[in-house]
Image: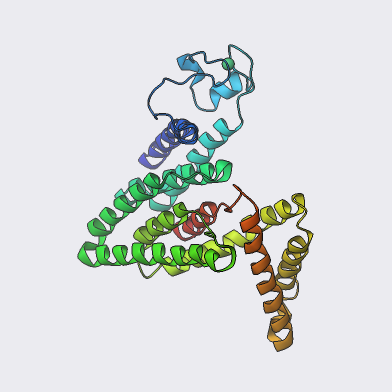
Amino acid sequence: MDLFHYVLIWVCLVGLCLGSFYNVVILRSLSNESIVFPPSKCPKCGNKLYFWHNIPVLSYILLRGKCYFCKEKISIQYPLIEITTMVLFVLVYLKFGISWTTLFMLFYVSGFLIMTVTDLKEQIVDCNIAIAICTVALLYAFLSGGVEGLVSSVLGTLAGAVVMEIVARLGYLFAGTRAMGEADTYVAGALGAIFGIHMIGWVLFAALIASMIFIFPMFVYRQYKSNNKLTCVLSILFILSIVVFKALWQNFWMLAILVIIGGWLAVSVLKGINKEENRTYLPYVPALVAGALYFIFV
Ligand SMILES: [Zn+2]
């Protein structure tokens, strides 16, 4: 077997094992427990797990998705995260090969994955992960690009954080509250450190597109569930007018109508943010991560 395939197998195994560890990090950062202690146990019956209950993916299949002791269902989240980590690791390896860049990229995508899952599940994001990514990215910028690289990375951090913070605070204008969580500012800063001042604008733009694709349907569904019919109809109208009537953008009046619908929608969305207690923020970290992954891999 040649070196490439030999390393590939190791990348898969390390991805699976780290994915298993990230499950613990995700679980503990949601429940605010220490990462290393206590040793892994069943969240339902509290029994300590045997070592063979901790083998990534394989254990889930052997135990048929149930706790060995109390037969409580084990969340599909565990094997899914292990497999996702492995896939991300393999993609990074295929893209960057055997290099220092690969190690740094593995670190970034790991942080991305953890923050995305906690944001999606409970709208909690550990800002320390974003800060760690930012620090490592600044180091990489200096090691690979010298002082010039470092300057671009620092400026990128500032630009990313400032732009995201301005967008978040625009919420005060309409709703008297932030439009996005503070974590989004940290994550945008970290992305600025990775991509530098010349690229961060494009990454944020890609994130905006991603947020429309992923978050919008979620938002419309939530509006529908909470009986906000007007916002619901406006959202669908807005998307339809963008997707279906793209050709009409050339026409000034059509464009004017689109802007009016969009503005009306924005105001009603931000008013809605004010009313929905606890459900204030839409998870935006997944969109930022999608934008970053796009520029890393494509
Ligand atoms: Zn159990």
Left or right: 154 as drawn, with respect to 90: left
Percent across and percent down for residue 249 are: 69, 81
Percent across and percent down for residue 31 are: 49, 32
Q: Going 74% across and 73% down the picture, which residue do you hit?
A: 241
Left or right: 103 as drawn, with respect to 263: left
Q: Going 54% across and 64% down the picture, which residue do you hit?
A: 171
Give the answer, above or below, for where 31 lies relative to 52: below
Q: Going 46% across and 48% down the picture, which residue do you hit?
A: 112
Give the answer, above or below, for where 273 lies relative to 52: below
Question: For residue 155, which quarter of the picture?
Answer: bottom left
Percent across and percent down for residue 79 are: 56, 31
Question: For residue 275, which quarter of the picture?
Answer: bottom right
Left or right: 165 as drawn, with respect to 173: left
The residue at the far left in this view is: 147
Question: For residue 69, which quarter of the picture?
Answer: top right
The foreground one among 211 and 28 is 28
Give the answer, above or below, for where 142 lies relative to 122: below
The residue at the far top in this view is: 69
Q: Going 43% across and 52% down the picture, which residue do you hit?
A: 95
- Colour mapping: rainbow
The foreground one among 272 and 282 is 272
Q: Quadrant of the N terminus?
A: top left
The foreground one among 29 and 209 is 29
**Quadrant observed for ligand 1 in the rendered image:** top right
Percent across and percent down for residue 119 are: 53, 46
The foreground one among 142 and 86 is 142
Question: Number of labelled discs?
Answer: 0
